[in-house]
Image: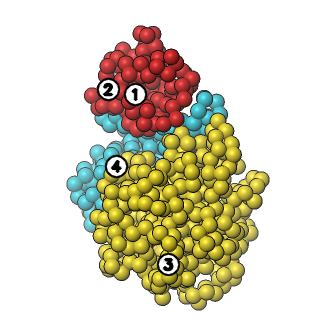
């Protein structure tokens, strides 16, 4: 059995998991209008940590997240040779050193926390976070390591904002995942962390069970989602089959839900093909924005909070169905015991990934 | 008018880094986005929006407008004339 | 036992398959080095011209490996080949070009931006082959045989029956590309282990 726990979220909604959970419970978003954020000084809605200033934002967030993690597990674990740190990110510290986007931060982690093993960076666009958690699970199941800390982090930079602006992919209002009026993403920044381990006793709070996950490529387009949801369909199907879990055992889906017209439509088609239409589902992008390489970890951590608190959190920004296939998008917070949840992610490069967490 | 069309062909080749293609290879009425034409895709369409602003000072705020305007060199030239009045 | 059955190197001026040189850079030519290989080897995939340098490298090396090992095209289902690449510089080369587009060339270029992620090369290879298998792109301090071996074994013990692995380091004129194909249940090849990976990865031909 592989365990997952000690989840940490740092976002505009707060620097602790508890602050983020209370904002989510109050359906409060981290998104605000930031003036002159875009190319040609365009104003954009962003989920930006306004208190985070100066340089090395990426490194600061990683250190802060690992500091929080270390307070929630056996303190010996981080400096053990049986522990690996896996960082998921797309652009790392690009603003500090475009030619070497991860080394400075990785070294800072090694020095501060006396890590024995060099951190591994998983950089697979928007599926990085889910893929990194899956990798942690696989490393532990294969007994290569006993413990892994997965830290997902990306910060807002001119680079990514200008890029998504050039693709006309940024929403002119806070993003509206799965809604009929959706017209693009809201960029976000933040950091999430989870600990994956073969030992239940290292966690101060009881962990949950992490099942092996899978990934699949759409083999269709590098920057546009598949019209048939092929990769997402295949990844979820493989993950369910691998764990012998039936669709009716899934109590909740934490979808990717970027709020672009094509992505959310693609997800509805994939979930429809999988027979998962009736499972309560949300996208957390309305709270955190799209945090790219961090999204999978932040949203997994948030889903773990939902499981611990037996609460389905409303999919913020959703009012009326805007996909060709019907989904059970959560429109109000609801109390519900969540035994088994599915987390999915899809992204540029045609990647899709999925994982399953179960209550113990 | 014809100068504009020739200029557009050069600009498209430059902006899209089209290898092995010269202005003479692009007919005025060739479908830019069809495989029989230049075989451009949706990202190229966004690159043509950049081209319009860079070389012609025309801002396109709704990419759907581009779908109509970028059918061929002829429609692009017409669009530029209409926008510049 | 898993065997490395085919491998390909690309350096700044030499391209080789299974240790045998297949192309040498012509420094007199106006064409880019990767375009020279593309033409000489008579590949016909128009999308190649739109790819960034990382994707071009991945495309060329994977196609050359497929030519040298025809089994790849026939022996596996469409989701049985995993793609597992790594490097140190991420997509820095294209990232700098994208920054140049908005700092010095008028506006951010959408066609450059879509390549500013290291895993795009995995997508390009998946698209070219209609491969729906597992994907992983990792950024590491340097070529790490142990990481390739460990994660490669993990992939092969799951639903993947073969893996196309690669170290794909490109930054400016420095090109270090080493792609290799690992299979189970085959007779000929080099044992997939740390020592052999280190030996085969040597870029000094």
Q: Nearer the viewer, mark 2 or mark 3?
A: 3
Q: Which chain is red?
A: B
Rendered residue at 61%/63% (across/down): A29
Q: Which chain is yellow?
A: A
Chain under disc 4: A
Q: Give the Cα distance between marks 1 and 4.
A: 24 Å
Q: Residue C154, how many percent across, how many down?
A: 42, 70
Q: Colour of chain C?
A: cyan
Chain under disc 2: B
Q: Nearer the viewer, mark 3 or mark 4?
A: 3
Labelled pair 4, 2 in contact (Cβ < 8 Å): no
Q: Give the Cα distance between marks 2 and 1.
A: 9 Å
Q: Looking at the picture, does residue A69 appear above or below residue C180?
A: below
| Mark 3, residue position | A334
Labelled pair 2, 1 in contact (Cβ < 8 Å): no
Local crowd size for mark 1, using a 10 Å CA cut-off: few (<14), some (14–19), many (≥20): some
Are the numbered discs 3 and 1 placed on the same chain, yes or no? Answer: no
Q: Residue furthest front?
A: A320
Chain under disc 3: A
Q: Residue furthest left?
A: C74
- Quarter of the figure with residue B57: top right
Mark 3 vs mark 4: which is more N-terminal? Answer: 4
Q: Residue A183, how many percent across, how many down?
A: 48, 49
Rendered residue at 46%/19% (across/down): B82
Residue B74 shows in the view? yes
| Residue in front for this viewpoint, A162 or A79 | A162
| Mark 1, residue position | B70
Residue B31 disc label: 2
| Mark 4, residue position | A220
């Amino acid at each position: 059995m592989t365990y997952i726990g000690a989840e940490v979220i740092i976002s505009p909604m707060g620097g602790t998991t508890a602050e983020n959970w209370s904002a989510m419970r109050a359906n409060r978003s981290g998104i605000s209008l930031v003036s002159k954020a875009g190319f040609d000084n365009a104003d954009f809605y962003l989920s930006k940590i306004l208190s985070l200033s100066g340089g090395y934002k990426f490194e600061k967030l990683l250190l802060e997240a690992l500091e929080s993690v270390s307070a929630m597990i056996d303190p010996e674990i981080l400096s053990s040779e049986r522990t690996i740190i896996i960082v998921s990110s797309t652009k790392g510290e690009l603003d500090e050193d475009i030619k070497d986007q991860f080394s400075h931060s990785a070294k800072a982690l090694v020095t501060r926390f006396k890590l024995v093993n060099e951190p591994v960076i998983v950089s697979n666009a928007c599926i990085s976070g889910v893929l990194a958690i899956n990798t942690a699970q696989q490393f532990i199941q294969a007994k290569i390591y006993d413990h892994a800390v997965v830290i997902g982090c990306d910060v807002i930079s001119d680079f990514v904002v200008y890029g998504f602006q050039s693709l006309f992919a940024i929403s002119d209002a806070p993003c509206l995942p799965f809604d009929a009026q959706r017209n693009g993403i809201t960029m976000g920044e933040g950091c999430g962390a989870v600990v994956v381990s073969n030992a239940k006793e290292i966690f101060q709070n009881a962990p949950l069970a992490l099942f092996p996950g899978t990934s699949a490529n759409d083999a269709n387009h590098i920057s546009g989602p598949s019209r048939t949801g092929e990769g997402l369909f295949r990844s979820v199907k493989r993950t369910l089959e691998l764990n012998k879990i039936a669709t009716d055992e899934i109590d909740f889906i934490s979808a990717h839900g970027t709020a672009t017209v094509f992505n959310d439509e693609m997800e509805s088609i994939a979930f429809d093909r999988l027979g998962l239409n009736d499972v309560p589902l949300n996208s957390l992008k309305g709270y955190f924005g799209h945090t790219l390489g961090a999204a999978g970890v932040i949203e997994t951590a948030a889903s773990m909070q939902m499981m611990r608190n037996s609460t389905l959190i409303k999919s913020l920004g959703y009012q009326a169905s805007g996909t060709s296939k019907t989904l059970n998008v959560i429109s109000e917070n609801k109390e519900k015991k969540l035994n088994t949840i599915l987390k999915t992610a899809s992204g540029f490069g045609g990647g899709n990934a999925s994982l399953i967490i179960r209550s113990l | 008018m014809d100068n504009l069309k020739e200029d557009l062909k050069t600009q498209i080749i430059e902006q899209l880094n089209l290898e092995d293609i010269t202005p003479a290879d692009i007919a005025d009425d060739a479908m830019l986005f069809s495989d029989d034409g230049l075989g451009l895709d949706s990202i190229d369409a966004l690159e043509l929006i950049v081209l319009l602003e860079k070389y012609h000072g025309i801002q396109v705020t709704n990419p759907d407008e581009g779908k109509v305007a970028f059918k061929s060199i002829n429609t692009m030239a017409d669009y530029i004339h209409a926008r510049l009045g | 036992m898993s065997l490395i059955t085919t491998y390909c190197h690309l350096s700044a001026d030499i391209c080789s398959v299974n240790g045998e040189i297949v192309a040498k850079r012509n420094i007199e030519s106006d064409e880019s080095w990767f375009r020279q290989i593309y033409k000489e080897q008579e590949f016909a995939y128009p999308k190649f011209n739109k790819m960034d340098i990382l994707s071009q490298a991945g495309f060329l090396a994977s196609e050359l490996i497929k030519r040298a090992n025809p089994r790849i095209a026939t022996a596996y289902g469409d989701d049985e080949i995993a793609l597992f690449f790594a490097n140190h510089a991420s997509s820095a080369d294209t990232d700098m070009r994208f920054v140049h587009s908005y700092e010095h060339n008028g506006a951010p270029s959408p066609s450059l931006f879509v390549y500013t992620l290291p895993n795009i090369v995995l997508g390009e290879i998946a698209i070219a082959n209609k491969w729906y298998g597992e994907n992983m792109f990792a950024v590491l301090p340097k070529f790490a045989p142990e990481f390739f071996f460990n994660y490669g074994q993990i992939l092969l013990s799951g639903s993947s029956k073969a893996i196309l692995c690669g170290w794909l380091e490109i930054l400016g004129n420095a090109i270090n590309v080493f792609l290799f194909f690992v299979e189970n249940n085959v007779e000929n090849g080099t044992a997939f282990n740390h020592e052999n990976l280190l030996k085969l990865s040597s870029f000094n031909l």
